[in-house]
Amino acid sequence: MQKVKKGEFGHLDYKKKLNLIIAIIAFAIILAIFIIGWIVNGTRNNIATVAAIVLVLPAAKFAVAYFVLLPHKSASKELAEKVNSAAEPLGVCFDLIFSNKKSPIGTQAVVVSDSTIVALTCEEKADIKLFETSLVTFMETDKLHVTVTLYKDEKTFLKRVANLAANFDETKENAMNKIEWNTNSLMNMCL
């Protein structure tokens, strides 16, 4: 399984698989320690049981991480190709889950310019206003001022991305640096 960095296409599927594999292995080790201790000592009241109990917490961390990621959908390869072609030269991230005060919101694609962030989600229950206000507030803590829009419709999103890319001025001072700063800042808000 090849490592996929946060923001790259396929990251969400990678994290789901990784957390599931680690959780299964961790719980299998815990069970093995408990059973070996019971067999060796003839009772469950032994130091191996204590060790198994202590190891449950780290194993549970990976299980919880898996279940937090489970309801969120990854971007399709077709969508990734469409977004990459429409967004050139803007920054593009895929499969991000944004944390906030209420509940995480998963996005399939996020396009970043020097002053605007547009995102696409397929989650019907996603709170658009919460997403937009929490991301703007988070970015302001890094002294970055952007407008944020969350779309649920792919065609409208792609049309907005194409418009952003067409109107982007690469020659503007620090434009490409601002894209990088905005991208790094929003990644810090993601799980």
Image: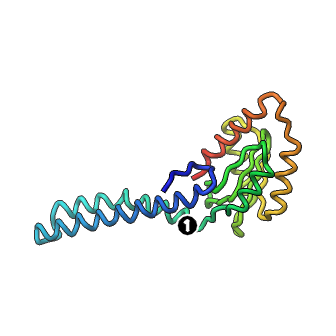
Q: Is residue 153 above or below residue 111?
A: below
Q: Position of residue 131 (x, y in %)?
A: 71, 55
Q: Amino acid at mark 1?
A: Leu
Tell me if I can see residue 100 in this picture: no
Residue farthest toward the top in the current orientation of the protein: 173
Residue lying at 88% horizontally and 45% vertically, measured from the top left: 166
Q: Quadrant of residue 152?
A: bottom right
Farthest residue to the left: give it: 41
How many numbered circles does the render carry? 1
Q: In x, y percent, where is residue 172?
A: 84, 30
Residue positioned 64% across, 40% down in the render: 184
Q: Is residue 177 above or below residue 154?
A: above
| Residue highlighted by disc 1 | 70
Q: Residues within 10 Å of mark 1 (few under 14, many from 20)?
A: few
The coloring applied to the image is rainbow
Residue 10 visible at all: yes
Q: Nearer the viewer, residue 10 or 71?
A: 10
Q: Would you identify the image quadrant in which residue 38 lies?
A: bottom left
Estimate the x, y position of residue 53 in percent, counting from the top left.
28, 62
Question: In the image, residue 117 lies at what x, y percent?
Answer: 76, 47
- The residue drawn where x is 68% and y is 63% is 76
Give the left or right position of residue 94, taking residue 88 as reference: left
Q: Left or right: where does residue 36 sit relative to residue 2?
A: left
In the drawing, does residue 178 fall left or right of residue 184?
right
Q: Quadrant of residue 156?
A: bottom right
Name the element at disc 1: loop
- Judge whether 168 appears above or below 150 on screen: above
Query: Would you say 190 lies left or right of 87 here?
Result: left
